Amino acid sequence: YQGGTWKQNKFEFTTREFGRYTLAADTIPPEVKALVINRKDLKFRISDSGSGIKDFRMEVDGQWVLMHYDYKTKLIWSELKEGSQSFKGPLKLIVKDLVGNEKVYTTQIQ
């Protein structure tokens, strides 16, 4: 993914590498697959077939949750710290790709 902008019927981008480039539209949002959702652990596989993952945000009961990310395995996961309250309530995961497509995953943790 290189990125760029349309200006007066031309697509402009900056690069330091020579080569052949292809102009393609990315209109498909990222994919989210829940692997583990319980009061102690949250684990998801996130991927994007187009431009790639830009960022993600996890909230449980309206509170931000720190998530670890392994780019190679496409896994994000949380670890409940010792002494912390368990995960409970509405869960919301927002995943965005590099061109702004967004996938929102929601569920309820009992």
Image (tube, rainbow, N blue to C red):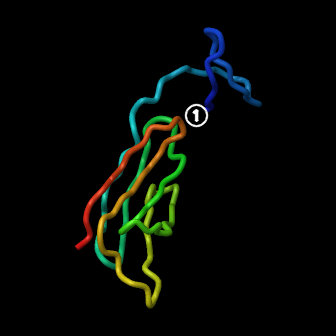
- For the N terminus, the quadrant is top right
Task: Work out whether residue 35 or residue 98 is closer to the camera in this orientation and state it.
Answer: 98
Task: Please identify the quadrant where the C terminus is shown.
Answer: bottom left
Residue 79 is left or right of residue 86, and the answer is: right
In the rendered image, the residue lying farthest to the bottom is: 83
The amino acid at mark 1 is Tyr
Q: Residue at x 43, y 80 (%)?
A: 80
Could you tell me which residue is drawn at 68 percent across and 19 percent down? Answer: 12
Q: Is residue 43 left or right of residue 14?
A: left
Q: Position of residue 32 (x, y in %)?
A: 35, 51
Residue linked to disc 1: 1
Q: Is residue 94 left or right of residue 99?
A: left
Residue 82 on image: x %, y %: 45, 89
Judged from this view, the residue extending furthest toward the right is 16
Q: Is residue 22 left or right of residue 30?
A: right
Residue 98 pos. (x, y %): 54, 39
Tell me if residue 56 comes above or below residue 98 in the rendering: below
Q: Residue furthest top?
A: 9
- Could you say which is closer to the camera, residue 81 or residue 18? 81
Position of 102 relative to 11 (above/below)? below
Number of on-image labels: 1
The image position of residue 87, as x and y in percent, is 34, 76
For the residue pair 51 and 83, the one nearer the viewer reads as 83
Task: Sort mark 1 into few (<14), some (14-19) or many (20+) by Cα contacts within 10 Å.
Answer: few
Residue 84 falls in image quadrant: bottom left
Determine the residue positioned at 61% across, 9% down. 9
Q: Residue at x 45, y 38 (%)?
A: 101
